[in-house]
Amino acid sequence: MSAPRSSPTPAPSSYKDVPTLSVSVRGVDFVYRQLGPEGDGVPLIMLHHLTAVLDDWDPRVIDGLAARRRVITFDNRGVGASGGSTPDTIEAMARDAVLFIRALGFEQVDLLGLSLGGFIAQVIAAEEPQLVRRVILAGTGPAGGPGIDKVTALTLRDILKGFLTRKDAKQFLFFTDTEHGRREARAFLERLKERTDHRDKAISLRSFRAQLKAIHRWGLQPSADLSRIRQPVLVANGESDRMVPSENTLDLAARLPRGKLVPLYPDAGHGGIFQFHEAFAARALAFLEARPDAWPLMPHPPPSRPGRGRASRAALDQTPSCPPAVPAAPPRTPSTPHAGSTSPPGRTLPVSTRRDGNGSAQLYG
């Protein structure tokens, strides 16, 4: 008599349930998680913010993207449960990320970089054009962008504020200090607690310092030559980002040859893609699945202030905006909330508008 067949274990349907895996990268173990359909499609590699580990990705963002894409999150060298020592330059972090991608056997990937991860994504896209098909940049900015060199001071200040108020510093760093912003922050922080088993290690103080040093160096660099990034790039952020001021988002969209701007999310800050997770996932998937000819090369003028990474006012006025993947909420209509958020509608910042912000990063960015 043959032994009874065991039923195959169903694949996890949510990021909070996926197992943590590891791969050897030149003798060093990097940990990662993956969710979504496997096959011949191009995987989406997620590059995270300052101090973040696997558990700091919003499960609603990952689940939304993984509904149609294979999504892979990972801890870069020295971060969380990954081995090795965290380097103190963005360029070295980018090289480690490329080694991780190649260790998994991928010949082409899409990238989604948030904040610090967005700095890394820009370097990879410029240095490895054959590896990277498309890029999504959220809450990030170009080398030399305004406010980026102030992240260290602002980060430490808000960590202290969180300690004194017994609140998670992400509430101050990622969300606006409004009634709706505070409510969205609480909802986000609760979502991060949904995974209860096999959670990742927190970042070490040594790695945190290395990341801060890398970010500071990025902020002091001369203006980036964004013309080297020839891939289609989708750029998103909240309209009131304190950590990487929102004008950096406008600058990226204006100067990237194939950049498209998601209209800045109203009453949202650095965590705009978490606050508007449903709307963001829909736009991101539409971008990743669009035909190549939907993103023609666009002429862009050089930055108006050499060394500071700013686009001219005229360049911002000409920034192409991404067509909505979901119906847009009409401005100032109290009864029509923005999709994917419980916040009431607000004014979406026009492309030509600049907002001054204060950069910043619990142990965050």
Image (cartoon, helix red, strand yellow):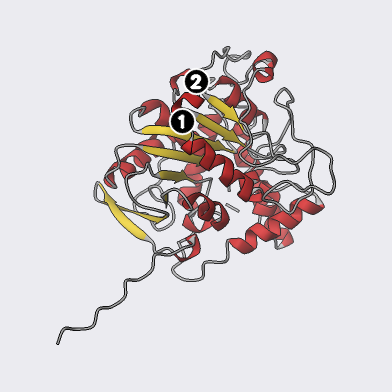
In the figure, is residue 37 to the left or right of 103? right
The numbered mark, 1 or 2, whose residue comes first in the sequence reads 1
Q: Is residue 205 above or below residue 193?
A: above
Q: Identify the residue at the far bottom of this view.
A: 1
* In the depicted structure, whether residue 334 falls above or below residue 15: above
* Quarter of the figure with residue 328: top right
* Residue type at the position of mark 2: Pro
**Quick check: can you spot residue 130?**
yes
x and y percent of residue 58 in the render? Answer: 56, 55
Q: Quadrant of residue 130?
A: top left
**Residue at horizontal 40 percent and vertical 55 percent from the top:** 34
**Residue at 58% from the left image edge and 40% from the top image edge:** 283
Number of numbered tags placed on the structure image: 2
**Is residue 38 rendered to the left or right of residue 274?**
left
C-beta proximity under 8 Å, tags 1 and 2: no
Q: Is 244 above or below relative to 342?
A: above
x then y, percent, for residue 63: 52, 55
- The residue type indicated by label 1 comes to Arg
| Residue under pointer 1 | 291
Q: Is residue 157 left or right of residue 36?
A: right
**Which residue is under mark 2?**
296
Circle 2 SS class: loop
Element type where label 1 sits in the image: loop
Q: Residue at x 69, y 43 (%)?
A: 269
